Image (tube, grey):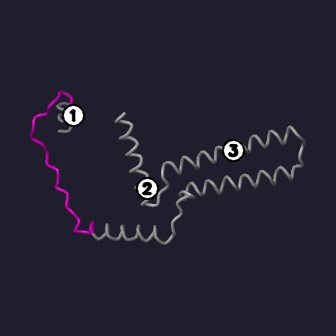
Amino acid sequence: NAQMRVRHLQQQQLEAFCRELGMPTRSEVTALGKQLHELRRELRGGAKQAAAKQPQTGSDTADETAGLRAEIAALKRQLAQGSPKAKKPAATAPAKKAAASSAKNQVTKSAPSKTPVRKASSRKPVTKTAARTAARRK
């Protein structure tokens, strides 16, 4: 199907563009989401199995839960910062952004433009409601 090929090519171009900008791609975000979902499932399953096998002491369960929460927090940080697969040196991304923003600022710095003062319209209103609102304003 031609439409599906076009969609697939668009997704490939978008992923390439995101990789160039250092942003996480759609496939990487999806992979992180799946990994997080699997960890949550393991956490729920592990808690159910542990409760069924034997009662653990409060400190053992608390330690295990704290460790799992720390692991989930680390995964969330990775997701927020970008992909763990495509780690780039930290100096290159800010340097590119700084160069792009300085070039942008140089282009956009110009004399402030004056907006023209709006004059009262002498045209006839098009609709009845426009005529009513125009009559109210006078």
Q: Amino acid at mark 2?
A: Cys
Q: Which residue does the numbered mark 2 point to in the structure image?
A: 18
* SS at badge 1: helix
Give the percent coordinates (x, y) of residue 131. 17, 31
Q: Amino acid at mark 3?
A: Arg
Q: Amino acid at mark 1?
A: Thr
Query: What residue is rendered at 19% in x and 30% in y?
Result: 132
What segment carries the magenta color? 107-129
In depth, the one of 94 and 85 nearer the eye is 85
Q: Main secondary structure of the magenta part?
A: loop
Q: Which residue does the numbered mark 3 point to in the structure image?
A: 40
Q: Which residue does the numbered mark 1 point to in the structure image?
A: 133
* SS at badge 3: helix
Image position of 101 (left or right of 108): right
The quarter holding residue 8 reads top left
Looking at the image, tell me whether mark 2 or mark 3 is earlier in sequence order: 2
**In the rendered image, the vertical position of residue 43 relative to residue 82, given as above or below:** above
Q: Are marks 1 and 2 in contact (CB under 8 Å)?
A: no
